[in-house]
Amino acid sequence: MTILVLDLVGCFVFALSGGLMAVRKELDIFGVVVLACVTGLGGGFLRDMAIGATPVAALSDWRYLVVPMTAGLLTFFFHPALGRLEPMVNVFDALGLGLFVIAGAVKALDFGLSPLSAAVMGLATGVGGGVIRDVLAGRVPIILRRSIFYAIPGFAGASVTAFGLFFGGAPSLVMAAAFVVCAGWRLLAMWRQWEAPLPRGAASV
């Protein structure tokens, strides 16, 4: 049940960010719903395929389709109001990242992966949908842009979840700490405009 709740809440939040991007790209209602669904479901789809959880949750449980579709339709019809909350798009994305890396790591552990592998799957869950969204929207994926401090907080949150649960930490405390580490670090990076480090002297190459 914990994985289901985390997945669905993260899916809804990510789908909102995908739908808002589709509106900014002036896509029609079908395009908005598709981009919302891809953003909300992409990471979990990749995770389930990688760990052998088939049929994947996005196809075997109707709720995984209804949630992002609903988010897409809400965005399409109420985008003027949501558009005024433009700064909230990145906030939604940061919260979704925090939820998804936790859900991905937990499910990977349940399927017998090592803590490190589970952390990688948590990161893949968190960034997969956003990567597909950005490619379809015609922009450089968010995790590859220097100005976006994104993947590092995601991997940190996934690692806290995977290693904390593996070594017997209380699930609620571990997941709360992981969410604060991931989403909090991401939001702080947005506020402080932090960038991921570059190799020394790379700017002069």
Image (spheres, rainbow, N blue to C red):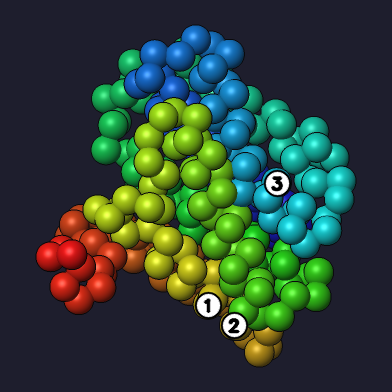
Q: Residue at x 86, y 50 (%)?
A: 54
Q: Nearer the viewer, residue 122 or 72?
A: 122
Q: Residue at x 70, y 29 (%)?
A: 66
Residue furthest left as drawn:
204
- Where residue 162 appears, as percent x and y from the top left, is 62, 76
Q: Residue at x 12, y 65 (%)?
A: 204
Q: Residue at x 23, y 62 (%)?
A: 195
Residue furthest bottom as drawn:
167
Q: Nearer the viewer, residue 71 or 129?
A: 129
* Local SS, label 3: helix
Disc 1 and disc 2 in contact, CB within 8 angstroms: yes
Q: Amino acid at mark 2?
A: Gly
- Where residue 112 appears, as percent x and y from the top left, is 80, 75
Image-based side of 24 in relation to 1, left or right: left
Q: CA distance from mark 3 to mark 1?
A: 22 Å
Residue 12 visible to an observer of this rendering: no
Q: Nearer the viewer, residue 199 or 147?
A: 199
Image-based side of 135 in relation to 124, left or right: left
Q: Amino acid at mark 3?
A: Phe
Depicted 141 relative to depicted 122: above or below: above
Q: Which residue is mark 1?
A: 160
Q: CA distance from mark 2 to mark 3?
A: 24 Å
* Number of the label disc, if any, that sits on residue 164: 2
Image-based side of 134 in relation to 164, left or right: left
* Number of the label disc, if any, that sits on residue 45: 3
Depicted 54 relative to depicted 68: above or below: below
Residue furthest front as drawn:
205
